[in-house]
């Protein structure tokens, strides 16, 4: 953002210098030429102001999108690590119970119960991670959607 502001300040300075030079040149010219030069300089300033504003809005949208997406993906990553930890702990608990099985039928029963339980747990985890990923993507795109909406409204005015 600081680089954008420095560039904008430099461009504004150049525009002001060009305007001053045009005014000096127009003082020696006839009134019609002076008026045309003044209009041209004003149009250039207005165009620059619109471009500067649009550039600043786009830059702000990129910054907002990055911050929002970054937060969303941190949440997704954190939840993924929690799910992995939970699954590893459940697996070790299952292995410990399996080692304590007194018979093959008890081991098969433990295996069946564990598989059913993990299927349900992992299905829930997958839904939760999917929802977080969707939320991160949609929230990350929101600043661009807002920028596009504002731009569309401005062009319609």
Image (cartoon, grey):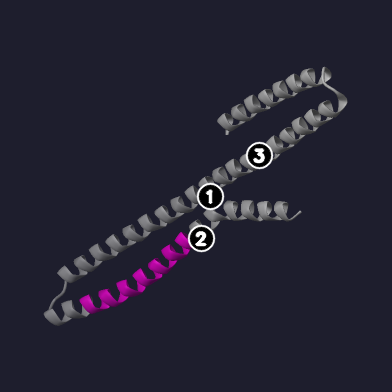
Left or right for 21, reference 10: right
Query: Mark number for residue 51?
Result: 3
Residue that lies at the very extreme toward the right in this rendered image: 31
Q: Helix, strand or loop at disc 3?
A: helix
Labels 2 & 3 near each other (Cβ < 8 A): no
Magenta-tinted stretch: 111-135
Taking the spot 49% from the left edge, 56% from the top edge, the residue there is 136
Residue 129 left/right relative to 50:
left
- Determine the image quadrant of residue 124: bottom left
Picture coordinates of residue 152 (x, y %)?
67, 55
Q: Is residue 40 magenta?
A: no
What is the number of the mark on residue 40? Answer: none
Left or right: residue 50 versus residue 86 is right
The residue at which mark 2 appears reads as 135
Q: Who's the residue at 65% across and 26% down the image? A: 9
Q: Front-most of 33 and 94?
A: 33
The image position of residue 120, as x and y in percent, is: 35, 74
Q: Which residue is mark 1?
A: 68
């Amino acid at each position: 953002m600081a680089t954008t502001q420095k560039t904008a300040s430099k461009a504004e300075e150049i525009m002001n210098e060009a305007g001053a030079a045009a005014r000096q040149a127009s003082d020696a010219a006839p009134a019609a030429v002076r008026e045309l030069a003044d209009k041209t300089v004003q149009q250039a300033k207005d165009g620059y102001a619109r471009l500067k504003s649009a550039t600043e809005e786009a830059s702000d949208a990129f910054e907002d999108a990055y911050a929002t997406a970054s937060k969303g993906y941190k949440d997704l990553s954190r939840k993924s690590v929690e799910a992995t930890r939970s699954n590893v702990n459940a697996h070790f608990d299952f292995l410990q119970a399996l080692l304590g099985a007194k018979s093959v039928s008890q081991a098969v029963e433990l295996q069946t119960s564990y598989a059913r339980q993990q299927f349900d747990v992992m299905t829930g985890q997958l839904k939760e991670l999917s929802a977080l990923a969707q939320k991160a993507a949609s929230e990350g795109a929101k600043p661009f959607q807002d920028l596009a909406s504002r731009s569309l409204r401005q062009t319609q005015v």
